[in-house]
Amino acid sequence: MDINRFAIKSNAKFSIGRSKPNAVLVALVYMIIAVVLRLLANAVSNWQGYLDFIYDGISEFGRMYPVGPFEIMSAPGTVIALALLIMEYMVSVGFIIYMLNIVRMRKASFGNLFDGFGLFFKVIWLAVLTEIFVFLWSLLFIIPGIIAAYRYRQAIYILLDNPGMSALECIRASKKMMRRHKGELFVLDLSFIGWYIFSIIPFVAVWVMPYTGFTFVYYYEALRGPDPDDAVALPGADSDDGDSRGRPPWEY
């Protein structure tokens, strides 16, 4: 099944126009939060770098003073910066939740930006596993790594739809869902290059973010297929090809 790229883009534009609260305003709030968190993370990193500079200076001059306190002071810098970047990622997941609500005509709000924290550990573990798998494939060559990245692109949507699934199950489900669609999604990504270039202009970026975001949500919806229960409609999911223990088809 080929997915009509122009149709899902048109649907994305329509969703921006009818969204309540307005998708551009939600994207603006998301961008402000993301920028603030990124600036704080950079500030913490710079603070740690300054402390490391002092620590190196003390070491250079024969350890005139105890270095323990400086090590204790600089160590939290990495943890705090990482925590801030994780928060930024969780807000981006919340933006996906907001867009899913709009597309499915559910009640949406600015508060959706923080709904991802309800699945905090699963979302983070999914992101970690995905990065590990993409990295391992990249060791073979850059092309397998890119293919792997496209193979797992739907995993986050699947997790949000099926919070009871494990991260590994979501990755396997995405792999099955993206079968014969990786090249198609790659072309869809390429179609946004012009918009990504223009998004260096702030007011353009605020529109491009929901435009691309809604497009990828509609792409996921097209792959997923109609399902009144909002569960993942994987190819062959309705067949009885699990074993006697009820093992899901995507685990094979």
Image (cartoon, rainbow, N blue to C red):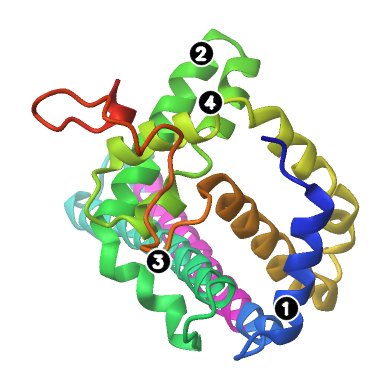
Question: How far apart, in angstroms, are the residues tagged by discs 1 and 4?
Answer: 30 Å
Q: Nearer the viewer, mark 2 or mark 4?
A: 4
Dot 3 corresponds to which residue?
87
Residue 40, magenta (yes or no): yes
Asked if one can make out residue 73 in the rendered structure from this viewpoint, the answer is yes
Q: For the residues carrying marks 1 and 3, which lies nearer the camera in this image?
A: 1
Select label 2 or label 1 by which is in front. Answer: 1
The alpha-carbon separation of the residues under discs 2 and 4 comes to: 12 Å
What residue span does the magenta drawing correspond to?
29-57
Q: Is residue 11 magenta?
A: no
Secondary structure type for disc 1? helix
Type of amino acid at the residue the image marks with label 4: Ala
Q: Amino acid at mark 3?
A: Met
Q: Which residue corresponds to mark 1?
A: 16
Q: How many marks?
A: 4
Provide the major secondary structure of the magenta segment: helix
- Percent x, y for residue 21? 60, 91
Which amino acid type is marked by label 1? Ile
Disc 3/disc 2 C-alpha distance (Å): 29 Å
For mark 3, does the 10 Å Cα neighbourhood hold few (<14), some (14 to 19), or many (20 or more) residues? many
Question: Which is more toward the observer, 225 or 64?
Answer: 225
Residue under label 2, please give it: 139
Q: Residues within 10 Å of mark 1 (few under 14, many from 20)?
A: many
